[in-house]
């Protein structure tokens, strides 16, 4: 009998390990890293069959600032999922507790990270269904991947006695040194820890009560009277702030005595470094070189074992290089030896101390209505490309310190400019004086693109006074 599964997608992430392509405001799960679909979209499509196509059975636990990104990706997957919005990132124990508290007590919950690469969706679903009976019997099920090489980047799970198609867990092991990884691989008794879990809500809550009662108590208080806004569920922020941050592995899985592990023999990667991305890219050429991103703009000349991720329209050329990772974006460039790929987050930390915007934001910034791209700026001016999705609109707003000139490049713009409402087509323009109430909307069926030239004494994004906003921003 096929079990009814309630997938929970854990959408947290700091966006530091794949910088500069991934940033804190736009982590890797939202980026089309391996084709034209993001990792989150692929994850949603992978778990949808387990939920029998019922969007209401799928929950995403995400940050408040990413709620519209999640909604957009879900729409691209043909789904409309519920979101639990964490007021702060508190690691997986708290995220899973919130989801369990919001679910029916007997619900069979499948917890999946949003940013893993598992190309064989059918094998994945078969693995989950094969473990469902154990989870329904009260076991806390985790999944381990059959290792294909002695990785030092993954944690390991040692198998204990067999139990049906799974095994009792003998122990969890942190990321090992190379000699230990070789030993684990040779023994055949160890699996990579995939960070995917299957359990009933009631069993997770009982385990948290025994092993991490403080985390559960805080989450219960935060979920006593959550705010509900359509598909968004917001726990109480003041209550949740008291929660300590800990992974579910430390909080529960390594301490509980009813943990089972089920092996998975398919391809799996947590896409946790540029080394992993390079290995998942297209097949290498005769010299071991690979390309990603806008691959037609990546070029190797007398290079060996070099990966290029081209991020824009400019050519990126590796000449005479060997064993390098080159990641190009419109506003930042990373060149790294593969031996140091796991330390990229240190680059982000350094940029944060310098207050560099590139540590957090892309030049192109996602908004619930579309996006903007700051293509040029200087003293007292800034130039942006702005795209507004069909049927979407910016807030009714004004600025104290800047005027704006808008030129329609494509699509149709409905412009509120003071007391006037104008319809502008391609090559038409308007001028918004300082202090004037205004709004940009797209009444058409195709994306609207404009070029905006700002001029004034201060051009920061915080110079916005909103009067009306359909997205709930103050």
Image (cartoon, grey):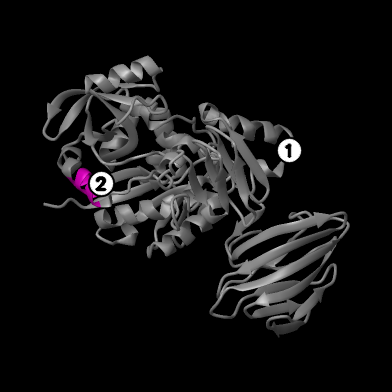
Give above or below for 431 relative to 111: below
Residue shown at the point (41%, 46%) measured from the top left: 114
Q: Earlier in the sequence, mark 2 or mark 1?
A: 2
Residue shown at the point (43%, 46%) measured from the top left: 281
Nearest the camera: 177 or 405? 177
Question: Would residue 466 appear left or right of 128 to someone viewing this image?
Answer: right
Task: Tell which residue pokes out farthest to the front in this image.
Answer: 302
Q: Is residue 85 visible?
A: no
Residue 423 x/y as whole percent = 69, 84
Say what secondary structure mark 2 lies in. helix
Q: Which residues are magenta?
A: 122-129
> Is 214 inside the magenta-drawn segment?
no
From the image, state whether disc 2 or disc 1 is nearer to you. Answer: 2
Label 2, label 1: how many angstroms apart (C-alpha)?
42 Å
Residue shown at the point (43%, 43%) measured from the top left: 284
Question: Would residue 162 appear left or right of 286 to someone viewing this image?
Answer: left
Nearest the camera: 313 or 451? 313
Nearest the camera: 349 or 441? 349
Which class describes the residues within 10 Å of circle 2: few (<14), some (14-19), or many (20+)?
many
Say what secondary structure mark 1 lies in. loop
Which secondary structure is most common in the magenta stretch?
Answer: helix
* Residue on which the image places disc 2: 124
Give above or below for 440 relative to 206: below
Give above or below for 331 relative to 382: above
Question: Would residue 327 appear left or right of 126 to someone viewing this image?
Answer: right
Q: Which mark is residue 355?
A: 1
């Amino acid at each position: 009998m096929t079990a009814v599964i309630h997938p929970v997608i854990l959408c947290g992430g700091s966006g530091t390990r794949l910088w500069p392509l991934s940033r804190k405001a736009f982590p890797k799960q939202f980026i089309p890293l391996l084709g034209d679909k993001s990792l989150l979209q692929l994850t949603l499509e992978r778990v949808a069959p387990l939920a029998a196509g019922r969007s209401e059975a799928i929950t995403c636990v995400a940050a408040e600032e990413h709620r519209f990104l999640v909604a957009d990706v879900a729409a691209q997957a043909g789904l409309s999922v519920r979101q639990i919005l964490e007021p702060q990132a508190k690691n997986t124990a708290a995220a899973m507790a919130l989801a369990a508290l919001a679910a029916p007590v007997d619900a069979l919950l499948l917890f999946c990270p949003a940013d893993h690469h598992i190309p064989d969706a059918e094998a994945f679903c078969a693995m989950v269904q094969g473990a469902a009976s154990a989870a329904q019997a009260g076991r806390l099920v985790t999944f381990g991947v059959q290792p294909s090489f002695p990785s030092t980047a993954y944690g390991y799970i040692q198998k204990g006695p067999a139990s049906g198609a799974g095994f009792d867990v003998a122990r969890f092991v942190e990321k090992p040194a190379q000699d230990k990884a070789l030993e684990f691989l040779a023994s055949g008794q160890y699996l990579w820890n995939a960070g995917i879990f299957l359990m009933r809500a009631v069993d997770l809550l009982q385990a948290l009560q025994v092993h991490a009662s403080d985390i559960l108590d805080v989450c219960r208080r935060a979920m006593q009277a959550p705010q509900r806004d359509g598909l968004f569920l917001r726990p109480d922020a003041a209550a949740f702030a008291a929660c300590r941050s800990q992974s579910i592995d430390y909080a529960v899985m390594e301490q509980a005595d009813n943990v089972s592990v089920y092996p998975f023999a398919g391809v799996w990667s947590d896409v946790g470094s540029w080394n992993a991305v390079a290995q998942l890219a297209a097949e290498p050429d005769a010299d071991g070189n690979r390309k990603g991103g806008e691959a037609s703009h990546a070029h190797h000349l007398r290079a060996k074992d070099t990966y290029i991720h081209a991020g824009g329209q400019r050519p990126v050329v590796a000449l005479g290089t060997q064993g390098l990772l080159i990641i190009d974006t419109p506003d930042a460039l990373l060149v790294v030896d593969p031996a140091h790929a796991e330390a990229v987050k240190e680059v982000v930390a350094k940029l944060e101390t310098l207050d560099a915007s590139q540590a957090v934001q892309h030049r192109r910034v996602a908004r619930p209505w579309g996006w903007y791209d700051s293509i040029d700026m200087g003293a007292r001016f800034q130039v942006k490309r702005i795209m507004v999705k069909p049927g979407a609109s910016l807030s009714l707003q004004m600025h104290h310190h800047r005027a704006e000139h808008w030129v329609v490049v494509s699509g149709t713009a409905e412009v509120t400019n003071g007391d006037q409402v104008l319809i502008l087509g391609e090559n038409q323009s308007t001028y918004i004086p300082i202090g004037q109430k205004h709004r940009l909307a797209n009444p058409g069926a195709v994306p609207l693109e404009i070029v905006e030239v700002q001029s004034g004494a201060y051009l920061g994004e915080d110079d916005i006074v909103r009067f009306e906003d359909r997205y709930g921003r103050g």
